[in-house]
Amino acid sequence: MFAKAAAQNLVYRLFDIPPDDFRRETLRLLTGGVRGLNVTLPHKQAAAELVNELTPRAARAQAVNTIAFFEDAKLLGDNTDGVGLIRDLEHNMSIALADKRVLILGAGGAARGVVGPLCERELRSLTIANRTPYKARKLAQEFADMGDIDGCTFGEVETPPYDLIINATAASLQGVMPELPSGLVSEATVCYDMAYGRGLTPFTRWAASLKAGRISKGWGMLVEQAAESFLLWRGIRPSTQVVLAALNQDE
């Protein structure tokens, strides 16, 4: 839809590559004529190690979700996840992030892409919770210069309720929801699932059961980060509203 709106001739399709084959298969695709790639879990950190150059935001995240292959055979790695999330929250959902208490569930490549852009919004605090505490605390430490950031296990998350809870785990894709303490959600809490999908996910079902104020399945982030990727590849930032409307109608 972006290509049609921008009068660009391109083919966009899915390549399902196992982690052990990521480097070899990605290089094969790029040398075979592919000009750009979006990269999803679990490959985002491997993609950061593959490219020749990182944009500043990808370097900060140490995770890549967009690769561009230029004429001089240089591979540029970018991370559009954070800008996609922020644009959806601020422009599409009209949420002001300043002075908000935010909880991120997960400390992998998906979380890495959004911590920096969130902290730029001068949050009151950011908590990163993960199944293993080491990854959460390590990620919090990497971004400690940007604000009040804590890392902990899922069971160690403390109340009062958060203003915004973001699911950056793969739990929704696997059909499970991590065990969390009670008291994290109020009727003013926004619950946002980065693991977009049709119908209710375990995370959105959990949020609904606790009567969260607003629940988003992440379609907006998917579309906004894709528009940013399109800009990197084609030099044009397409309008997202038509695509968002089509997704919502199709839901």
Image (cartoon, helix red, strand yellow):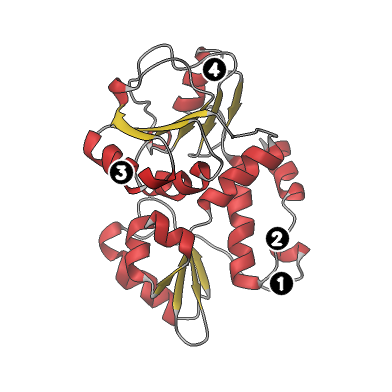
Kindly identify which residue carries mark 4.
208
Query: Dot 2 surroundings within 10 Å: few (below 14), some, or many (20 or more)?
Result: some
- Report the residue at 41% width, 62% height from top: 59
Q: Amino acid at mark 3?
A: Gln
Decide if residue 47 is on the left or right side of residue 88.
left
Distance from label 1 to label 3 (Cα)? Answer: 42 Å
Q: Where is residue 109 drawn, in percent x and y? A: 38, 49
Residue 197 place in picture, x, y as percent:
53, 38
Could you tell me which residue is drawn at 46 percent across and 48 percent down? 116
Residue 141, disc: 3
Residue 179 marker: none
Q: Are the two marked residues, 2 and 1, in contact with CB atoms closer than 8 angstroms?
A: yes
Q: Please name the residue that numbered disc 1 is placed on.
A: 8
Sequence order check: which comes first, mark 2 or mark 1?
A: 2
Q: Disc 4 and disc 2: Cα gap in Å?
A: 33 Å
Task: Work out whether mark 3 precedes mark 2 in sequence or the reverse, and give the earlier one.
Answer: 2
